[in-house]
Amino acid sequence: MSTVTSIAALLLFPSGLFLLLSGLAYEWADRKLLAQFQNRVGPRWFQPLADVVKLLAKEEVAPDGVNGRLFVALPIIALAGALTAALYVPLFGLAPAFSFPGDLIVTLYLLSMLTLCMGIAGANTLDRFSLVGATRALTQLFSYEAPFLLALLGPALVAESWQISEIAAYANGRYLLLTQPIGFLVAIIGLMGKLELPPFDAPEAETEIVAGALTEYSGRGLALFRLGKGVEMVVGLTLVAAFYLGGVANPFAFLLKTLVLLLVMVVMQALMTRLRIDQTVGMWWRYGALLVLAQWLITILFHAISQVHLMG
Amino acid sequence: MQTDTQRERFTIPIGPQHPALKEPGHFRFSVDGEIVTGATVRLGYAHRGLEKLAEKQNWVQNIYLFERVCGICSHTHATAYCLGVERLAGVIAPPRAQAIRTLVCELERIHSHLLWLGVSAHEAGFDTLFMYSWRDRETVMDLLEALTGNRVNYSVNVLGGVKVDVTEEIAQAIYKGLDFLEERTHHYLQVVSSDASFLQRARGVGVMTRQQAEVMGVVGPTARASGVTRDIRIEAPYAAYADFPPQVIVDERGDLEARFVVRLKELLESYRLVREILARLPEGELTVRMPRRIKSGETVSRVEAPRGELFYFLKSNGTDTPVRVHARTPTICNMTSVVRLAVGHQLADVPLILAGIDPCFSCNDR
Amino acid sequence: MKFGSMLKDISQALVQQPATEQYPSVRRPVPERLRGRLVWNPATCTGCGLCATDCPAKAIELLVLDKKAKRFVMTYHIDRCTFCAQCVQSCRQGCLNMAANHWELAAFDRDDFLLRWQSAPESG
């Protein structure tokens, strides 16, 4: 790949600008669908973009008592992490821009950067709401991270590769959703936890702690965090769709499958009450982790049996 | 060794401006992690000096002043005031007027309880229930608008009667609206008492025992959800409640779920009551003549607001302006229970416990 | 205990029109009794001033120039009015009314909130 196309892939398409815009588009779809489910009108199509443009144009106020450099750097790191993660994912039905063995693990950890940055951003300020929000964000991160990772490693296990492009190629046309239903469920709920969507929005529960870790953020920082979240949504949806829903080999399949996933997520958002943070943690460790481990066990057993059969 | 004073306490201020509060109030919760260890409340941010202002206005003007104490139970305030003034003057409003007052009281209770359902669902993080209950609340708001001419401050009461009459057309519209609301309320009742994700936030949370409720002097649906049978509509019937007695809804459990159930069952009771009033509306005049100067004397007037007992004290010296009007609203009676119940609960439960008493800071601060 | 007890509502909403009314472009019929702006009919006014006395918001000022010749100036402050209709109730002659069709009263200029009516003198 030449340098020019590499830079274009980084900055414009499929990563970079195009990804930011599609992140906003998915955010709009999420909000609009939720509004439709709640019998409301919902935002117009350009609302998330307008919000971001407005925030970018505004002054960023760094409150007293924060580490100024960290305050400015964290949103940038968060967005950079999410954008980098996108490079290894088959976005929009195209092959990943970059790929190497084991990039699945790297991608998942890059995706966690956003939450981590938000947690640190909250802990960086003196604001009580931010501090509580940061504690909750990090607590939640530690609870869903392991099950979510294990759930995405399920397909890796059967594909016998830890490289996203290879797993995606294996899963193409194979609906692993049918063979690993628990893994799929945990993956999609884990994604909701990652994106802090209701009912896992305890870290930013507005009726308790205003805006959680990001309470003190305004202007550019908030816009970058929001962009990062949009990107993370697209990347997360792509991963789950590519692994569990029979692959995203072409743009049409990508759009269809990610939107179906989004629909499932919105239905869950509409139907459930916000979980307290202790309930979230309890749910993940008591059910999420155990179920996905059971799924693993079954997968490995089947795998071993089929190996034995092959050899026999 | 650390003493309590040395240990830095992590205090979370909620209010006067906070998304959980729809009106200004200030709470300080000291927390240990997520557990609330102490709570204090400070009120008075919405004080408008209405009681003092009442001493400068004539008896008629004051109806509308007290109607604006609260944006949700406006009619209840005006009714309490009018009934008090009528008692001072020795005038009794005609039966049809009393029945219409009662009718609007009950319609107002319906709108207030539906509003509360939405607010509480939102505090719990169940926005779908919030949106749907408020959508359905529009039905009763429209009915009130058709009946009285306004959505919020109905201005139904005048001294010695009411302004508006119920026509056959409006009665039919109310019947129709109530049929829809009744079906929806049964649905919501089923949602709040069976939805697993909702119940884990409401069941067994913020439990107030009957004894606690009696000691703290809690009133209204909050008290009734703890098994205290306390309802002014039955204990001291006013307006037309003697002819149309409601049934007291009580629940022994005392938790947040009980408060949801009690209020929703009260809605069903209100539907029944409204239908009964419409079916047996007494014929006759709407107003009687009222003197402009009220005989000197003092009296109290008690009514059951949607949130609990509302108490008015009125004193006249024989002129056309009152000497003193005092309103004590249900929120102040219930507020102690929030501060008490919050301790030991998770921070996440606090907004729901606060919403559980259906606080109205504007009522409270006057 | 079950999950998703509002599933029926949200699946119905998927094919329903949103309940929100798009107000300026869609207007609902106004209820007959809606209390809008005050309308004064000077023909029957006696100039007793009870409307101004009873107005809780002091939105009405009635200037009596000549009671016998029925020359009054009625000043009505829309911005002060609380639309309680006590004036309508207090007026024994029935010359006040609240118009149901005049309810969109917002204005850019404060002067637009001041309405002044003059009763026509009986003989010019």
Image: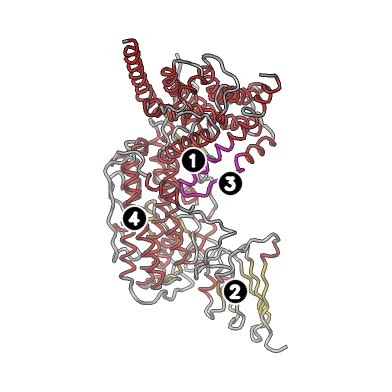
Q: Nearer the viewer, mark 4 or mark 3?
A: 3
Residue B243 figure quarter: bottom left
Measured along the vertical axis of the image, is residue B134 above or below residue A300? Answer: below
Q: What number is the disc on residue A271?
A: none
Chain of the residue displaying label 3: A
Question: Which residue is found at the position 68% from the left and 25% from the top?
Answer: A8
Residue A50 visible? The answer is yes
Q: What number is the disc on residue B183?
A: 4
Q: Are marks 4 and 3 on the same chain?
A: no
Which residue was labeled with disc 3? A44
Magenta span dominant secondary structure: helix
Q: Which residues are magenta?
A: A24-48
N-terminal of the pair, mark 1 or mark 4, is 1
Cα–Cα gap, marks 1 and 3: 27 Å
Q: Position of residue A4 (x, y in %)?
A: 71, 22
Q: Nearer the viewer, mark 1 or mark 3?
A: 3
Q: Secondary structure at mark 4?
A: helix
Q: Is residue A44 magenta?
A: yes
Cα–Cα gap, marks 3 and 2: 41 Å
Task: Give left or right: position of B29 versus C3.
Answer: right
